[in-house]
Image (tube, rainbow, N blue to C red):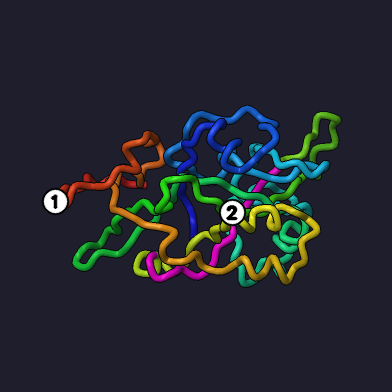
């Protein structure tokens, strides 16, 4: 499961890290508490094959959907069934992207407490994590006007948690090693090769620390949400 993450790296850093040719959309200000329905930064291959940075709405809307509200339930796609589910199989076959995140949030159970403790999971290197994604383009069938433009949306692929994440949650995003970025983005890559990439990340790729419950409130959005709590700090209770 991945329901909240951070995208705060500069466009220049992303262009350099992912070897993108250009940014084809205006990139947003840093977002420290990304929620479904927001536009997020992605890396994908343009029709000519060059790598570009773009913006897509988080929550995949299949081409056959009658209403875009279905995307609220399709923010994640399980890697074990992505090639079979009608909502995802077409996108997995030919419309894949990388979603660069500076980290993501999860909530872990704490003995003796009814509420869960939020944690921030990030790369050991401090660089953005390359999360595997799929994307889709949808036209509203109820809008017959010439102004009806495609809504482009995306979902995050998840897999079983590695031993670092498992005590927190049994799922984690699929994290792509740099050597596999080109294969993931190339629509001609064979399915067997794609399937082999959908494994949990090695334990030494990620680390985590506890953060304030301020992240629970989606209205909160600043860099302090990622900061580690002091050992004896008592986080204030904040409702979703």
The correct choice, above or below, for 157 with respect to 66 in the image is below
Q: Residue at x 64, y 37 (%)?
A: 55
Q: Which residues are magenta?
A: 152-164
Q: Position of residue 18 (x, y in %)?
A: 61, 43
Q: Position of residue 87 (x, y in %)?
A: 71, 60
The correct choice, above or below, for 26 with respect to 91 in the image is above
Q: Which residue matches tag 1?
A: 232
Q: Residue at x 36, y 51 (%)?
A: 120
The correct choice, above or below, for 8 with respect to 206 in the image is above
Q: Position of residue 227 (x, y in %)?
A: 30, 43
Q: Residue at x 39, y 65 (%)?
A: 165
Q: Residue at x 51, y 32 (%)?
A: 10
Q: Circle 1 sits in a helix, a strand or a loop, which is it?
A: loop
Number of residues whose C-alpha sits closer than 10 Å to that of mark 2, classed few (under 14), some (14–19) or many (20 or more)? few
* Residue 178 circle label: 2
Magenta stretch encompasses residue 163? yes
Which of the 4 quarters of the picture holds residue 156?
bottom right
Which of the 4 quarters of the picture holds residue 92?
bottom right
Of badges 2 and 1, nearer the viewer stands 2
Q: Circle 2 sits in a helix, a strand or a loop, which is it?
A: helix
- Residue 165 seen by the camera: yes
27 with respect to 114 (left or right): right
The correct choice, above or below, for 28 with respect to 163 in the image is above
110 with respect to 10 (left or right): left
Residue 158 or 88: which is nearer the viewer?
A: 158
Which of the 4 quarters of the picture holds residue 43?
top right
């Amino acid at each position: 499961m991945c329901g909240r993450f951070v995208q705060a790296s500069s466009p220049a850093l992303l262009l350099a890290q992912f070897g993108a040719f250009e940014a084809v959309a205006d990139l947003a200000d840093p977002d420290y508490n990304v929620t479904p329905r927001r536009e997020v930064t992605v890396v994908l291959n343009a029709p000519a094959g060059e790598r570009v940075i773009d913006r897509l709405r988080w929550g995949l809307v299949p081409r056959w959907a009658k209403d875009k509200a279905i995307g609220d339930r399709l923010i994640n796609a399980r890697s074990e069934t992505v090639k079979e589910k009608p909502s995802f199989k077409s996108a997995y076959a030919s419309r894949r992207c990388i979603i660069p995140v500076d980290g993501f949030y999860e909530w872990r159970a704490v003995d003796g407490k009814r509420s869960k403790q939020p944690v921030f999971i990030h790369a050991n290197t401090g660089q953005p994590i390359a999360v595997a994604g799929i994307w889709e383009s949808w036209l509203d069938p109820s809008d017959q006007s010439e102004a009806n433009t495609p809504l482009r949306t995306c979902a995050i692929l998840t897999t079983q948690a590695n031993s670092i994440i498992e005590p927190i949650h049994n799922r984690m995003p699929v994290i792509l090693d740099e050597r596999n970025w080109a294969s993931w983005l190339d629509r001609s890559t064979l399915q067997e090769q794609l399937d082999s990439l959908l494994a949990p990340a090695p334990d030494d790729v990620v680390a985590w620390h506890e953060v304030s419950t301020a992240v629970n409130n989606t209205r909160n959005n600043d860099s302090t949400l990622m900061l580690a709590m002091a050992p004896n700090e008592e986080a204030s209770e904040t409702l979703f």
